[in-house]
Image (cartoon, helix red, strand yellow):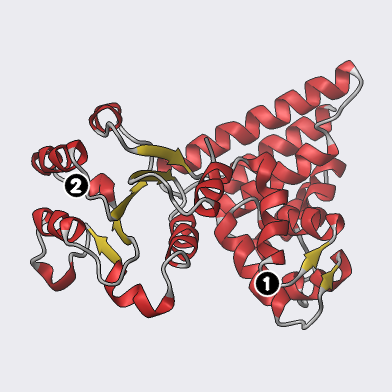
């Protein structure tokens, strides 16, 4: 299952009584809540749409048992009540039994949506019998299609060249890409091509990830670090790594010769190692070390 499976459930009106949505990017939960809330008529939202955050309980004194009581309360009007529980990964184990009892006999007129940040633990998965579990992280291969759909929701049609340019410059992070779509909406144009994006994204900046990769491939160490010195003022390490990954996949990913294949393998080995290091260090990573390794590979190639 994936983000597409979640959208299919939305199209069907969330037919199951209980859901768990898991993601590694909190931005995707905001997207999910937006779609879920649209299922409740505006005039009913004050009564039939509820959000609870286990990190920030309403009023500071709402217990998990109180949330269960909200689920069991008959909704106003004749609609279905939707209850979203955010940061479900923070639920104390002692409260899990209360949830299991609820799941054994869930309210007929309510839909419960649990939002879990990170990878769902095995014991949690096994405890949530009767809950439809959907990981909503977007695989990198699906980012272009998601980006186009996101733009269409804002009445914007992105060309393939515009999509490729956005991902190459910004990286495959949905949150950052979404903010660029919002900027595109300000242009007042229904069709957006690559040329429309250059000034928005780069502005008056002289260098980009494109020029950085060109400098790496040419083995120009001085230029590589000059460009990086400018880019690091506006780019987070993970965002820059995502952009490098995407651009390298397009330029060397389809290598036909043995030498080209070996170079591509070594490049992605270095990029993957950097990705793991960034994740394990919480974003603190010496990008300079990555650039040195990529330069060495280019010079050998």
Q: Is residue 51 left or right of residue 299?
A: left
Whole-percent x and y of residue 84? 31, 58
x and y percent of residue 173 in the render? 59, 53
Q: Nearer the viewer, residue 123 or 240?
A: 123
Q: Nearer the viewer, residue 32 or 235?
A: 32
Q: Which of the numbered marks, if any, corresponds to residue 154?
A: 1
In the image, is 133 to the left or to the right of 7? Answer: left
Q: Quadrant of residue 271?
A: top right
Q: Which mark is residue 127?
A: none
Residue 91 numbered mark, or none:
2
Alpha-carbon span between mark 2 and mark 1: 36 Å
Task: Tell me what residue is drawn at x 41 percent, y 43 percent.
Answer: 281
Q: Earlier in the sequence, mark 2 or mark 1?
A: 2
Q: Residue furthest top?
A: 258
Front: mark 2 or 1: 1
- Residue 178 location in percent, x, y? 61, 64
Question: Callout 1: few (<14), some (14-19), or many (20+) C-alpha neighbours within 10 Å?
Answer: few
Q: Residue at x 8, y 40 (%)?
A: 94
Q: Toward which corner of the image does residue 61 lie, by quadrant?
A: bottom left
Q: Secondary structure at mark 1?
A: loop
Residue extending furthest toward the right: 257
The image shows residue 127, relative to residue 68, as above or below, that is: above
On the image, which quarter does residue 226 sit in? bottom right
Looking at the image, is 59 positioned above or below residue 95?
below
User: Is residue 165 visible in the rendered structure shown here?
Assistant: yes
Q: Residues within 10 Å of mark 2 (few under 14, many from 20)?
A: some
């Amino acid at each position: 299952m994936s983000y597409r499976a979640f959208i299919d459930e939305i199209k069907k009106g969330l037919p199951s009584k209980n859901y768990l949505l898991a993601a590694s990017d909190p931005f995707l939960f905001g997207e999910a809540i937006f779609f879920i809330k649209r299922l409740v008529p505006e005039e009913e939202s004050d009564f039939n749409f509820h959000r609870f955050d286990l990190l920030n309980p309403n009023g500071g004194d709402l217990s998990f048992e109180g949330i269960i009581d909200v689920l069991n309360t008959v909704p106003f009007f004749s609609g279905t009540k939707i209850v979203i529980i955010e940061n479900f990964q923070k639920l104390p184990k002692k409260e899990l039994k209360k949830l299991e009892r609820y799941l054994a006999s869930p309210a007929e007129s309510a839909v419960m949506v649990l939002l879990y940040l990170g990878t769902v633990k095995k014991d949690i998965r096994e405890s949530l019998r009767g809950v439809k579990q959907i990981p909503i992280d977007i695989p990198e291969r699906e980012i272009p299609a998601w980006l186009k759909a996101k733009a269409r929701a804002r009445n914007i049609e992105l060309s393939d060249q515009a999509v490729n340019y956005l991902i190459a410059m910004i990286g495959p992070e949905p949150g950052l890409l979404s903010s660029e779509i919002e900027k595109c909406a300000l242009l007042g144009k229904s069709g957006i091509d690559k040329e429309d994006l250059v000034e928005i994204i780069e502005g008056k900046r002289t260098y980009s990830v494109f020029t950085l990769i060109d400098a790496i491939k040419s083995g120009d160490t001085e230029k590589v670090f000059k460009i990086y010195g400018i880019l690091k003022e506006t780019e987070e390490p993970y965002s820059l790594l995502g952009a490098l990954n995407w651009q390298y996949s397009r330029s060397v990913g389809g290598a036909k010769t043995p030498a080209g294949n070996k170079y591509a393998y070594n490049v992605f080995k270095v990029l993957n190692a950097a990705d793991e290091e960034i994740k394990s260090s919480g974003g603190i990573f010496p990008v300079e070390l990555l650039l040195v390794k990529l330069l060495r590979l280019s010079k050998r190639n």
